[in-house]
Image: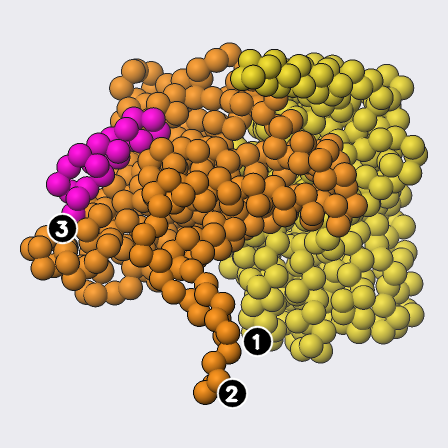
Chain colours: A yellow, B orange
């Protein structure tokens, strides 16, 4: 009886393994750091996945995967279960992605916001969110009455510092008296912490609230307090209809569609992608008419210029907090400098936590 | 009229069988939930509980996941058995990871067989140190150890945040909140090529054996059990309560610290903000599911580990929401506590008496 049980168990396991491996259909896998309903970062990646699915390509996702020891297993399971292309959509998946990529040379990997491409089947991609920040800075500089902009920042990594600097530079251009106050919350998603930070900034006199975190809490606090705010990652307008001037939208869909088709057709190649307003990876939600049609026109023009390359978020002269020159007059910062940015520009208050 | 009465004789075999019953009830309840969600319950349960461990890699992952859970739960069982409610194993794990990780960074690019043992011991030491805070506050200042140990979890998390963002962050890492990857000499040896199962499992097995020895073969174990059954009896018998409290917290802190150092030198290989997906809290479920018994805890840790793997597999193959894993953990505990209640108490249905009308 026991032996019979064991034998049938083995054959069941064997059949199971067989049926899993026999699947040859082209499949794309996604690993998310948050829940699909966060209305921010993961939500937008999920929208991108939906666009791939709409092409008739089979996709799979795993949500809320911790960036610790579990990530490697999830990525490996996706690779093992016949997925041909895998998007890992958070910085913390960088090392696990490269580790798994080594063992699955025939599977393509795409890692968002990282910098390690240790194997030829790993690409990285990110968006020039700072271009959106420049537009926000322009609006903030024009709309503020207290000349104080409140900024909720996540981690002192180049991407976040770039955003702070781009925003401050653009705001200074239209309003030289501008000050940027920053609260570091050291999280990407924590509605409680984010709303406390927003309240603290409003109490310090900020009448513009901006966030580099993913929840809708800050815009909701701003709505209640009657100050202006900007949405992050997705269009958050419905959470704060009066307060939100616009949102920076991460639009991953075109990239996911393009890379999925390339992988399916065998034309996928390793690359490091950094797309912005021009390619549409960074998009702007509709502008709030409360800021007046003149300002809307200005911002739309600036958006066009940034997209066409006529304007650049980091055009010299740019000074650091101590007054040292970072970018000479007339020059623009190159991508290398942007990628490693770790100083504040003049006008930002406080120090970068080190 | 319903009356609840305490049972006088509780059968020992049934006492150990109720966790099994709880698991079956969970499977049944889970099947119903899957059915309501619109999935084929048999298929969903298969993807949840069979597929994840149907190959060597899956089995190895199960052990990788169960190792820290088992280790922490064993430590906690000492505390819980003696009526000390250490809820902060997560903090002790993180602090052990911090101390062990700090030593690993100190030995960066340093070869030698002694590196790893030093790191492991310092991790255990870190866990002990952190567990001492609630223990000393409880014994000498009469504070509530539940609150102190729980709040210290946040202290440990914030300290780790500070270190990986600031002084310990990788100088070549663009300010990202993580340290360097530890050198090979600071990593747990991998047992089989291509699998992630590492030498940490031996630490766990040795700990299980030692804890069995302590609990069942020593005077200390006897003290712990008596204090758990009745603090007054323990006092009356002349046991030194304070020393015992300190010792059980030390054991529990050491185990949590070892689990932390096992994670960072094992599958992770560096310090960052997410070294533990709340192992310290999940281990509380594991400890009770395992009846605070070393052998029971081994099985309980495997089952709870499987709920994690299962949630991932079920989402990959059926796109079942990932949070069903937590639902399953909750159900197991619920059914266990529920059947415990019926185990220790009996419910009598009495007819309505006239004078009550």
Taking the image as shown, residue A134 lies to the left or right of residue B329, namely right
Vertical placement of A93 versus A103: above or below?
below
Residue A264 image offset from top left, x and y in percent:
86, 22
Q: Disc 2, disc 1: CB below 8 Å?
A: no
Q: From mark 2 to mark 3, how far is it between C-alphas? A: 56 Å
Q: Are marks 1 and 3 on the same chain?
A: no
Q: Which mark is residue B214?
A: none
User: Dot 3 falls on which chain?
Assistant: B
> In this orientation, does residue B261 appear?
no
User: Dot 2 falls on which chain?
Assistant: B
- Which residue is under mark 3? B243
Q: Are marks 2 and 1 on the same chain?
A: no
| Residue found at x 51% / y 87% | B357
- Which residue is under mark 1? A203
Taking depth in this image into account, of B139 and B320 the one nearest to the observer is B320
Residue A115 image offset from top left, x and y in percent:
63, 30
| Residue found at x 33% / y 16% | B111
| Residue found at x 73% / y 28% | A86
View extreme (left): residue: B238
Region of the chain picked out in magenta, as a range: B204-223
């Amino acid at each position: 009886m026991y032996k019979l049980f064991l034998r049938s168990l083995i054959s069941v396991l064997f059949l199971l393994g067989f049926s899993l491996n026999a699947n040859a259909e082209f499949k794309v896998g996604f690993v998310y750091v948050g829940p699909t309903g966060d209305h921010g970062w993961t939500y937008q990646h999920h929208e991108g996945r939906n666009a791939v699915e709409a092409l008739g390509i089979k996709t799979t996702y795993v949500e809320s995967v911790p960036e610790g020891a579990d990530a490697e297993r999830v990525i490996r399971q996706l690779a093992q279960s016949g997925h041909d292309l895998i998007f890992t959509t958070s910085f913390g998946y960088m090392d696990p992605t490269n580790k798994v990529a080594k063992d699955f040379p025939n599977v393509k990997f795409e890692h968002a916001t990282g910098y390690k491409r240790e194997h030829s089947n790993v690409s990285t991609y990110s968006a020039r969110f700072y271009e959106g920040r420049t537009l926000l800075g322009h609006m903030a500089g024009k709309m503020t009455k207290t000349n104080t902009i409140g900024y909720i920042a996540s981690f002192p990594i180049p991407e976040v510092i770039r955003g702070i600097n781009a925003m401050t530079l653009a705001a200074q251009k239209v309003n030289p008296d501008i000050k940027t106050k920053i609260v570091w919350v050291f999280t990407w998603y924590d509605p409680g912490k984010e709303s406390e930070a927003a309240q603290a900034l409003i109490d310090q006199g900020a009448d513009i609230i901006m966030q580099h975190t993913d929840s809708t809490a800050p815009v909701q606090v701003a709505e209640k307090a009657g100050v202006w705010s900007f949405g992050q990652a997705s269009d958050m307008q419905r959470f704060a209809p009066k307060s939100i001037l616009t949102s920076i939208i991460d639009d991953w869909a075109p990239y996911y569609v393009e890379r999925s088709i390339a992988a399916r057709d065998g034309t996928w190649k390793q690359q490091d992608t950094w797309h912005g307003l021009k390619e549409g990876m960074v998009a702007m939600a509709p502008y709030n008419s409360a800021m007046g049609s003149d300002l809307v026109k200005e911002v739309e023009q600036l958006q066009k210029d940034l997209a066409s390359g006529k304007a650049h978020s980091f055009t010299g002269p740019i000074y650091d907090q101590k007054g040292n020159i970072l970018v000479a007059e007339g020059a623009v910062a190159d991508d290398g400098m942007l990628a490693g940015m770790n100083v504040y520009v003049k006008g930002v208050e406080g120090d970068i936590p080190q | 009229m319903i009356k609840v009465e305490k049972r006088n004789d509780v059968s020992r075999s049934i006492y150990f069988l109720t966790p099994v019953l709880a698991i079956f009830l969970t499977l049944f309840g889970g099947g119903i939930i899957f059915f309501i969600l619109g999935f084929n319950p048999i298929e969903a349960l298969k993807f949840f509980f069979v597929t994840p461990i149907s190959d060597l890699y899956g089995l190895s992952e199960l052990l990788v996941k169960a190792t820290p859970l088992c280790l922490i739960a064993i430590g906690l069982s000492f505390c819980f058995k003696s009526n000390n409610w250490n809820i902060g194993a997560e903090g002790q794990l993180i602090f052990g990871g911090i101390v062990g990780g700090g030593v690993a960074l100190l030995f960066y690019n340093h070869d030698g067989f002694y590196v790893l043992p030093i790191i492991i011991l310092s991790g255990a030491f870190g866990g002990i140190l952190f567990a001492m805070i609630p223990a000393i506050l409880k014994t000498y200042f009469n504070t509530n150890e539940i609150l102190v140990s729980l709040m210290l979890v946040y202290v440990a998390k914030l300290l780790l945040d500070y270190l990986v963002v600031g002084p310990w962050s990788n100088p070549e890492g663009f300010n990202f909140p993580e340290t360097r990857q530890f050198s090979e000499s600071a990593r747990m040896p991998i047992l089989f090529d291509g699998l992630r199962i590492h030498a940490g499992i031996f630490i766990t097995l040795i700990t299980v054996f030692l804890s069995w020895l302590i609990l069942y073969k020593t005077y200390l174990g006897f003290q712990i059990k008596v204090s758990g059954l009745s603090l007054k009896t323990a006092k009356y018998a002349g046991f030194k309560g304070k020393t015992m409290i300190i010792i059980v917290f030390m054991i529990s802190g050491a185990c949590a610290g070892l689990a932390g150092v096992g994670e960072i030198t094992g599958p992770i290989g560096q310090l960052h903000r997410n070294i533990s997906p709340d192992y310290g809290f999940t281990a509380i479920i594991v400890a009770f599911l395992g009846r605070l018994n070393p052998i029971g805890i081994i099985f309980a840790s495997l089952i709870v580990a499987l709920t994690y793997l299962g949630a991932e597999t079920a989402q990959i193959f059926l796109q079942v929401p990932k949070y069903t894993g937590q639902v399953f953990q909750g159900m197991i505990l619920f059914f266990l506590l529920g059947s415990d209640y019926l185990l220790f108490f009996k419910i009598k249905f009495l007819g309505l008496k006239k004078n009550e009308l």
